[in-house]
Amino acid sequence: MINVKQTKKEFLNFFQDKKLKKVLDLGCGKGLMSLFFSKKGIKTKGIDVKELLSEKPDNFEFVLGNVVKEDFGRDNDLIIASLILHFFNKDKVHKLFEKIKKATSKRGYNFIICMSEKDSMKNEGKFFPTKEEILSFYPGWKVEKELQDETEIEEHPNVPPHKHNLIFLILKNEQT
Ligand SMILES: C[S@@+](CC[C@H](N)C(=O)[O-])C[C@H]1O[C@@H](n2cnc3c(N)ncnc32)[C@H](O)[C@@H]1O
């Protein structure tokens, strides 16, 4: 069983000694993942359909927009997609993966956190993948760090207490 906050931190620590110049955080929410990088002076951009950040930290650019339409730029050393993929239709998500990979630098990283096919909130039309399904989008990329596990029981307003089954993956672009 995992604590999501702690596991996110543990995965973020993987990047502690990596030389990153540019980070893009898709569906950044309150920007907690982004802050880890912007605080270190790394140029970080977050895109979200909702403006949830109360203040804009240094080195952080927030774009209010839909990741389907926004330009991801090029040569991002790290693109994060944390808990956003379940919003996407299963049959359309490949377009997002292509866009993410195209915008990642050579030897750059993708950090994915998503609800798996074992998640209690699984919705048939949406993307709740197996780890293998995610990896099928990444031929030629190396798995640097991975984990799949159930979360502790979570309680949010308007839904009964529930657990999630999450996949954490850090992938490195090793294509030539
Ligand atoms: C569960 S939150 C995750 C926030 C953050 N990534 C994290 O891990 O803490 C999902 C976020 O994705 C955003 N989102 C959903 N669909 C989006 C889209 N198509 N484009 C941009 N943001 C989106 C939501 O507004 C929300 O802030």
Image: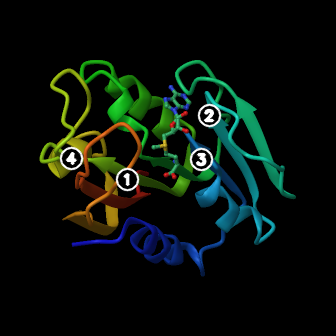
CA gap between label 1 and label 2 equals 16 Å
Is 101 on the left or on the right of 120, as rendered? Answer: right
* 3 and 1 marks in contact (CB < 8 Å): no
Is 149 on the left or on the right of 73, as rendered? Answer: left
In this view, 118 is above or below 121: below
Among numbered discs 2 and 4, the one appearing first in the sequence: 2
Q: Position of residue 88 (x, y in %)?
A: 36, 26
The three-letter code of the residue at mark 4 reads Ser
Give the structural element (helix, strand or loop) at label 3: strand
- The image quadrant that residue 127 belongs to is top left
Label 4 crowd (10 A; few <14 / some 14-19 / many >=20):
many
The residue carrying mark 1 has its beta carbon less than 8 Å from ligand 1: yes
Q: Mark on residue 116?
A: 4
Give the structural element (helix, strand or loop) at label 4: loop
The three-letter code of the residue at mark 1 reads Ile
- The image quadrant that residue 5 belongs to is bottom left
The residue carrying mark 2 has its beta carbon less than 8 Å from ligand 1: yes
Q: Position of residue 1 (x, y in %)?
A: 21, 72
Residue that label 1 marks: 113
Label 2 crowd (10 A; few <14 / some 14-19 / many >=20):
many
Q: Nearer the viewer, residue 70 or 116?
A: 116
The residue carrying mark 3 has its beta carbon less than 8 Å from ligand 1: yes
CA gap between label 2 and label 4 equals 22 Å
Q: Is residue 3 visible?
A: yes
Q: Position of residue 116 (x, y in %)?
A: 21, 47
Q: Position of residue 10 (x, y in %)?
A: 44, 77
Residue sitting at 33 percent across and 61 percent down?
Answer: 142
CA gap between label 4 and label 1 equals 9 Å
Q: Mark on residue 48?
A: 2
Residue that label 3 marks: 25
Q: Nearer the viewer, residue 168 or 123?
A: 123
